[in-house]
Image (cartoon, rainbow, N blue to C red):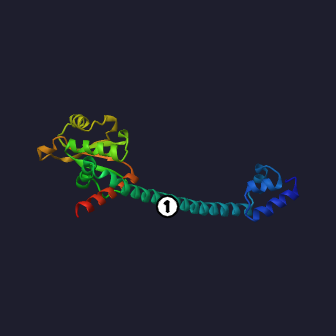
Amino acid sequence: MVRNEDKFEQALQFRKRGFTLEEIAKICEVSKGTVSKWLKNNAISEGVTKQNKKRAGQENAKRLKLMSKTRERERETKYREAIRSAETEYKHYKSSPLFMAGLMLYYTQGDLKNEHQIRLSGTEGKAHKVFIKFATEFMGVPKANIHFWILLYKGQSEELCMKRWKAATSLPYSQFYKNQYINTKKTKDTLHNGVGNTIIGNTVLKHKLNRWIELALKELAK
């Protein structure tokens, strides 16, 4: 039996209008647990609960969509700023042999399609070492943020190849990703250490690198 019929009726009316149990408790100056007991097994209250859940889900979806759009705009702003910065920096860097070497190395051996990752692939250790130096000096990438993995051929020693690539790149083993094997035997002596892959995961820097390459190619093609 509900002891306070006035407050019960008040709670029921507010519930019919879609108020939550917590909101009703504050209005009626009782605990949320009391309101829950009053309205337990009440068909109208159960219907409101379903409606509130549905509305909450819809509002949450709208909020997530809005957050996604906001983040997308923020990312696009960062990319535009990176490109503008690249255009200014290019004028100062283009006279450096290391800068131009890094750009041409990536243009010929790098992954130009992936928007979120910088990846240089090749069999020459010196090329990777030059690119790593380029990345640290001109892109400002801490050496600790550069990773490496090796594409190995059937029959190659992973331990020996890792040792040679470690010496070639000066990267510690802790920065090596899991290596990959392909199920075929090597066909050329130049692949005796596998194919090295220098990895930098940074979307903003990838936009900047791509813009540098565009500017360099445009200038060299004059």
- 180 or 203: nearer the viewer: 203
The residue to which callout 1 is attached is: 73
Give residue 8's position: percent from left, percent from top.
83, 57
Give residue 86's position: percent from left, percent from top.
37, 55
SS of the residue at dot 1?
helix
Quadrant of residue 9 within the rendered picture: bottom right
Residue 31, visible in the rendered structure:
yes
Residue 172 as seen in the image, left or right of residue 79: left
- 217 or 37: nearer the viewer: 217
Residue 38, visible in the rendered structure:
no
Give residue 216's position: percent from left, percent from top.
27, 58
Quadrant of residue 129 within the rendered picture: top left
Give residue 217's position: percent from left, percent from top.
26, 60
Instruction: Give the answer, above or below, for where 215 lies relative to 193.
Output: below
Instruction: Give the answer, above or below, for where 127 lies relative to 28.
Output: above
Residue 75 as seen in the image, left or right of residue 116: right
Figure disc tally: 1
Q: Residue at point 28% right, 36% down? A: 170
